[in-house]
Amino acid sequence: MQEKKYNVAIVGASGAVGEELLLLLEQRNFPIKNIIPLASSRSIGRSVTFKGKEYPILETTHDIFRQQNVEIAFFSAGGSVSKEYAKSAINAGALVIDNTSHFRMDKDVPLVVPEVNPGDIRKDSKLIANPNCSTIQMVHILSPLNRAFGGITRVDVSTYQAVSGAGKKGMEELILQMQKFFNFELDSITPHAFPHRIALNLIPHIDVFLENDYTKEEMKMVNETQKIMHTDFAVSATCVRVPILRSHSESLSIRFRDAVDVGKAREILESSEAVVLLDKPSENKYPMPIIATDTDETYVGRIRVDNFDKKILHLFCVADQVRVGAATNAIKIAEKWIKL
Ligand code: A2P
């Protein structure tokens, strides 16, 4: 039987994640009949290249999904755009895979990391949410470990998040500020994408502060992890923006019910899907953003047992925010849905 091919729209095709989606759909040979790049009216007149052919960017409107017979729509243009247009795509008969946080905690919307909870994808799903970038790489690590050592009871995580998390404007702002630094003009900059200067700085503040003194980004890591893993263990996060272009790093402290064996933890992670074990400290081998960038895996290393509590494992993981944390995960969701 001939493989079915789909009309695929990318809402936010001119953005950082949108561009990566196009690249990966091509590289992964996703079954595409027609690609429909969508963005705001600002992008009219621009085009994207897919499989060597130019496609004009069209304006996102309520009618475009029906007009173009869209069957799968990836949304990566921000929560307000998903809020406004996702229903129109669904009403036109498309499956929406939403990269924004808008629908993630809606109880009727599956929130999926294909290596962790593929069973939450249903063929009759109309909308599937892609988790927050920091959550995805964390559950790549937590999920396989949760089955070991009597299960996880608590996770403390500190993140070192790249500027790509703020989209193209975040990446451009870091580059511009670095250029200004070399021209001795750093004092003259006005931050736009971040609350403070990001070049040669770090900012322990991503998204807005909430009543409980955590940020919204930090609470996404708590709530989304529990939803994806179908668990209720405690999670506390501190999310920090760092002057790195596009890979997020995380330092995790994981407490289990029983004592931990570091060799077994390494074995488990080494054989886990979408995870690469890189843990040879004597050879200076451990995960770093320059290793993870442009890859589809979560790298893990620096694995060690706590000096004072043998039930606690510490480790460090890194993944490309634009790919593992967004585009790759979204496409893997679509690939699983197609196979159902
Ligand atoms: P545009 O380039 O036309 O503004 P990033 O996350 O890298 O900042 O990218 C954001 C993406 O979301 C861009 O493709 C941007 O398109 C798109 N976008 C922003 N606002 C809208 C909107 N109102 N309707 C459709 N797409 C939008």
Image: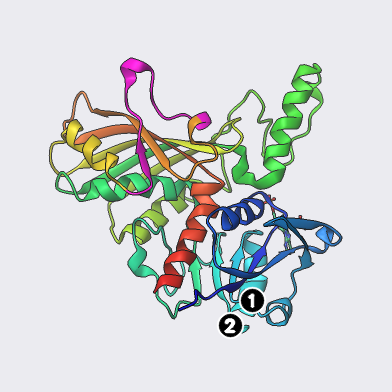
> Does 70 sit above or below residue 297?
below
Q: Using the image, determine if residue 335 lies above or below residue 208.
A: below
> Residue 302 versus residue 220: which sits nearer the camera?
302
Left or right relative to 318: residue 229: left
Tell me how far mark 1 sits from mark 2, CA to CA.
Answer: 7 Å
Query: What stretch of residues is rendered in magenta?
Result: 273-290
Q: Which mark is residue 93?
A: 2
**Residue 249, position as x, y percentages in the image:** 46, 35
Residue labelled 1 has its Cβ within 8 Å of some atom of ligand 1 = no
Residue 254 image offset from top left, x and y in percent: 28, 39
Q: Is residue 195 left or right of residue 226?
A: right
| Residue 204 placement, left or right of 52 | left
Disc 2 residue type?
Answer: Gly
Quadrant for ligand 1? Answer: bottom right
Tell me, yes or no, whether the highlighted magenta stretch contains residue 224. no
Q: Are marks 1 and 2 in contact (CB under 8 Å)?
A: yes
Res 303 visible: yes
Q: Name the residue under label 1.
A: 70
In the foreground, 171 or 274? 274
Which quadrant: the N terminus?
bottom left
Residue 287 placement: quadrant: top left
Which residue is pictured at 67% across the width and 64% down the height? 11
Please, what is the three-letter code of the amino acid marked with disc 1?
A: Val
Q: Pinpoint residue 322: horizontal percent, then vertical percent.
A: 57, 46
Query: Where does residue 154 sit, x and y in percent of width and height?
Result: 27, 44
State the residue lying farthest toward the right. Answer: 45
Residue at position x 74%, y 69% in the image: 60
Nearer the observer, 195 or 292: 292
Query: Crowdedness of circle 2 by 10 Å Cα count: few (<14), some, many (20+)?
Result: some
- Quarter holding the C terminus? bottom left
